[in-house]
Image: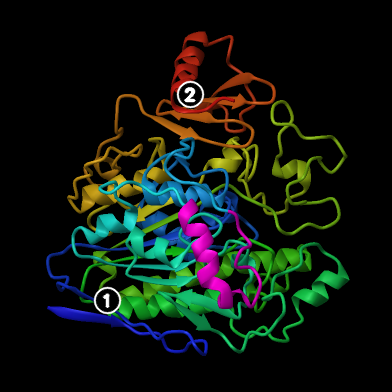
Amino acid sequence: MKKSILSIPFFCVGMPVICFSQSIENNKNGTPNVVFIYADDLGRGMLSHYGQKIISTPNIDRLFQEGTAFKYAYGCMYSAPARASLLTGYHDCRTDKWNVSKGGKLREANTYEKLDSVENEVNPLRVELPAGDLYLPQVFKQTGYVTGQVGKLDWGFTATRRQIREHGWDYYCGYLDHQRAHFFYPGFLYENDTILCIPENTHPTGGRGFEGESPENYRERWNMTGKVVYSQDLFLERMIRFIREHKDEPFFLYHSTQLPHGPVAIPAVHPEVKDNKELTEIEKEYASMVKMLDDHVGILLAELEKQGILENTLVVFSVDNGHETYYTNGNRSMKSPNRDMDGRKFDAWDYPYRSDRTGDRFDGNNGMSGKKWMNWEGGVRVPLVFRWPGKIDAGKVSEQVVANYDLLPTFADLLDVSLTVPKDGVSLLPILMEGKERLLSLRYVYISSDEGPAVVDSDGWKLRYNKKMKKFRLHYLPNDYREELILNEKYPDVLERLKTQLEKETNLN
């Protein structure tokens, strides 16, 4: 037996020093390690794999070149339900599997002093799965994996240490509050049950960036006083340490990144975009956040290779939701805009948000309609790729419609873990490892949004519902990338079939 010990190097005065130990069998049976990178607000259009021309993302592109990707993969409309859906295996139109707690309870720099009182307030309000209904890390624990999560937070907008433990994480380093996760130079983080102090970071806002291309915001972003340790650099160090300490045993490492979620904040502008005269300063900085994400993926792959375990590691990359813009300049690329650059008002039906209508130089939503928070494709369609050389085909693209809530059943299938409670998701292994083209003769994926729910079937039909207008809108995605053609009258049978599914699975009110 090999004993694994994770110890915490430095702490806030007065906090308990807690080490975590777990005994696990050595990884000698070929069971793969799993590294899952979940990017934040990264639109498909920001990846050079999908045609991004201004910046390159060679390390993420490598995953697509050496793995199997899904053309029609869906996240959620924003991050909190996306993480909950991922960790539970249920779609986000459900109202009984989790709740989204309010953020900001741990926002201020001194709130670690009242962490216990905040947790005592939050814990009783949590909606948790009943015993036997497994969370994602618990699936791995069933077969002796050591589990680690590094990054944003487990789920909700305020998480707790008890929640982290009960969901099955052996090791955790990151935030417990969504609003603090927008601070890239935090004075403290949470590591297991303990406060991880970062005394070098003394900036009063935690280095929270200032959006907008103004001289004042630029000066504030680059006022580096008290901004020493960049959170994503610390996360990278913790992940490398986790890999090194567990290289001889099966492990599941989940990285819920802050990148490239805004407000824009980066330690340095990346050399690739530094001298690009076509970009504004804030566009260069945002591009550098995407570049850092890609660089860190490359560093993790290199570390796995250095430790001799890359070929026996399943690497998965995906994103929580569609693109969001954090690089406003005047009336161009405005965040959550309600009008185009000419002043014409957007709506959720006839005139949707598109990159070319707002001057988004990066075309972050990859030419689709909509963005984060919307049930258009640009708001919910995300990258998803699996790399495991020799086990999963390289360079393959599946057209099977899939969702983030399929990850849990897929990993359970991989590890031969029986799910005694049925999930909404289904295993993707038949496509990934058995050469099948479809999972079911007809499969439905459900999506929630503030506009209303939507459903997509495995033939490419999509039905959107608008709660305000009380209207349905039918599209056929293979022939309608921008969702411009309304096919309600031409295909009434398809409309009724999808409407029945939507009414059965979602709340239309």
Q: In the image, is residue 110 part of the stretch drawn in magenta?
A: yes
Q: Which mark is residue 502?
A: 2
Residue 169 coordinates in the image, percent (x, y): 34, 65
Q: Quarter of the image for the N terminus: give it.
A: bottom left
Q: Which mark is residue 419?
A: none
Q: Quadrant of the rendered structure where residue 210 is?
A: bottom right
Q: Residue at x 57, y 28 (%)?
A: 480
Q: Quarter of the image for the C terminus: give it.
A: top right
Q: Can residue 254 be seen in the rendering of this structure? A: no
Magenta region, residue range: 102-125
Residue 190 coordinates in the image, percent (x, y): 48, 74
Q: Is 67 on the left or on the right of 465, as rendered?
A: left
Does dot 1 land on a helix, a strand or a loop? loop
Is residue 277 depicted above or below 157 in this figure? below
**Residue on which the image places disc 1:** 246
Q: Can residue 330 be seen in the rendering of this structure? A: yes
Q: Amino acid at mark 1?
A: His
Q: Amino acid at mark 2?
A: Leu
Q: Residues within 10 Å of mark 2 (few under 14, many from 20)?
A: many
Q: Residues within 10 Å of mark 1 (few under 14, many from 20)?
A: many
Residue 440 coordinates in the image, percent (x, y): 29, 29
Is residue 31 depicted above or below 343 in this figure? below
